[in-house]
Image (tube, rainbow, N blue to C red):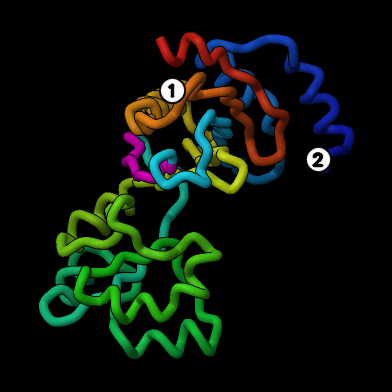
Amino acid sequence: MKSGKRYAEAAKLVDRSVQYDVADAIALVKKTSGAKFDETVELHIRTGCDGRHAEQQIRGAVVLPHGTGKSVKVLVFAKGDKLSEAEAAGADFVGGEELIPKIQNEGWFDFDVVVATPDMMGVVGRLGRVLGPKGLMPNPKAGTVTMDVTKAVKDIKAGKIEYRLDKTNIIHVPIGKASFTEEQLADNFQTLIDAIIKAKPSAVKGQYLRSVTMSSTMGPGVKLNVVKLMS
């Protein structure tokens, strides 16, 4: 539970009975983030999807115009010319089969995103049990299984984030840092919410976005006006 005096004071600034406009929500989230570190601003989107059905799954990726404020380490699985291409694009680690035991046996996870060329997925698939639970398994829908490793690495470094449903049909995603300007957070928010609205599965019946809450890492949640977001 988040508690403590600072959190209690911050929570008083948020009216839980109100659904805020985006601009007001961003201003509130910035105001209520008072930790000693630069907090991440997060969105928690409760959907009307039923992720148990494949046709109601949501998974994709989008490049935030102002990035996430976090430097991301990228590991690329490739072979041949694609190894040097990935290095030139700015990948932090590149390799092939020789990396399997390092990850599997030595517990090496000094990376945030894994990209793989399609011809390496047979090798990467052997890491499914360790990469899967950490959300690190490359996926074509997220653009992390591709022959265009240059674009994949550059997009990730520029602030590409992945969104997907969790087991409770909620999407949790970062949209920047509390130190970002309100305009930067608003741009990132709009880019992300547009992508998620566009990704609505046709099989979903009833209300698609049930609730959207914005918060900083240690701050209280601020509810957004869903009707306005969908209009």
> Which residue occupies 56% across, 13% down?
225
Tell whether 69 sits left or right of 29: left
Distance in Å between CA atoms under marks 1 and 2: 26 Å
Residue 2, which numbered label?
A: 2
Tell whether 78 sits left or right of 160: left
Give x and y (percent) for residue 115: 31, 65
Magenta segment boundaries in residue numbering:
57-65
Note whether 147 is above or below 192 in the view shown: below
Q: What residue did someone put label 1 on?
A: 186
> Which residue occupies 51% across, 16% down?
22
Give x and y (percent) for residue 218: 71, 39
In the rendered view of the protein, which quadrant contains the N terminus?
top right
> Which residue occupies 82% across, 33% down?
6
Residue 138, which numbered label?
A: none
Note whether 93 is above or below 104 in the view shown: above
In the rendered view of the protein, which quadrant contains the C terminus?
top left
Q: Earlier in the sequence, mark 1 or mark 2?
A: 2
